Image: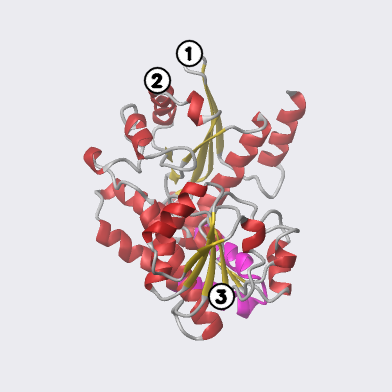
Amino acid sequence: MTEMTDGVLHTLFRSEQGGHEQVVLCQDRATGLKAVIAIHSTALGPALGGTRFHAYASDEEAVRDALNLSRGMSYKNALAGLDLGGGKAVIIGDPSTLKSEELLLAYGRFVESLGGRYVTACDVGTYVADMDVVARETRWATGRSPENGGAGDSSVLTAYGVFQGMRASAQHLWGDPTLRGRKVGVAGVGKVGKHLVRHLLEDGAEVVITDVREESVRELLDLHPDAKLSAVADTEALIRVEGLDIYAPCALGGALNDHSVPVLTATVVCGAANNQLAHPGVEKDLADRGILYAPDYVVNAGGVIQVADELHGFDFDRCKAKASKIFDTTLAIFARAKTDGIPPAAAADRIAEQRMSEALAERAAARKA
């Protein structure tokens, strides 16, 4: 336990991946709840980020995931133009066996105890119905069902935002903001991926898909029998598809790594998965191969834009208009990358950090006034 704590404390207080304002360890023995709530930054406002329910290999892995994901949310929310900071929570355990109404209610009480510093939503392993339960114990739960005053499934606008990022990538690289005639590979066709496939097919793209769940692949193929839609066995096959223009990782993180980048046939990477870069330096490896990377936390911000709108009374058209701006934001990042001579991921970080820094400076000036 000492070894794990030392590693976590080093990450939190001394590493470049740290800098968090607050990390809360939550436990409710009666329900089996073990959770971590990480608040990275409230420079722009309350920390917003989803709750991941996952069977981690270790408690240390769970804490590190919360730290990394919450940091990513600060940058995502900043670049999405939201007046919200970044946070994330993880519940440790297999949701198929551990999740219960009592556990979710206990978790909601922990969220409420933070007094609005953290606003939660859905993530991997949690769903709209879960947020409805959590919301019974806290007003700081978004991603609820329309029947309970929420926005419903945020994957709809997540996919729409990724599509806008792809359009921007096409504009930047090929001079035309359309995917017509392009071959796009989508890895993961679950909640977000299936909506992304629909946008791509409607825009005239040829789409190749894969998913660990065969039923998800079969469902899409049956739904679009006359479209230019095909499937391959796995991600290993997908990243090697001949003539692939765009690769869209839409499952778990770490898809861009020392193994996948050297063999990737696509010239653009733009997908919905969080934390696609397996480690620092992968963004340079992509650039060195001439592969344009649309930063994940920029293009997948449609979902957070949607759930954030619940705090003001949800309006879908207003959210979609905000998500449409992901196109302009992505183009601005590519332009900054070219001007500064750095990869797009580094350019996105600089723009987000500038917005957060300016907000802190304004707050400090207001205190002195």
**Can you give x and y, in whole percent of width and height, for residue 311 in the image?**
30, 46
- Number of marks in the rendered image: 3
**Amino acid at the residue labelled 2:** Glu
Residue 357 seen in render: no
Q: Residues within 10 Å of mark 2 (few under 14, many from 20)?
A: some
Residue 32 seen in render: yes
Query: In this figure, which residue is indicated by the disc labeled 3?
Result: 334
Q: Residue at x 71, y 62 (%)?
A: 282
- Answer with mark 1 or mark 2, whichever residue precedes in sequence: 1
Query: In this figure, which residue is indicated by the disc labeled 2?
Result: 102
Q: Nearer the viewer, mark 1 or mark 3?
A: 1
The secondary structure type at the circle numbered 3 is helix
Q: Are marks 1 and 2 in contact (CB under 8 Å)?
A: yes
Q: Residue at x 75, y 58 (%)?
A: 259
The secondary structure type at the circle numbered 2 is helix
Q: Are marks 1 and 3 in contact (CB under 8 Å)?
A: no
**Amino acid at the residue labelled 1:** Ala
Q: Residue at x 50, y 24 (%)?
A: 98
Q: Is 160 on the left or on the right of 332, as rendered?
A: left
> Foreground: 364 or 14?
14
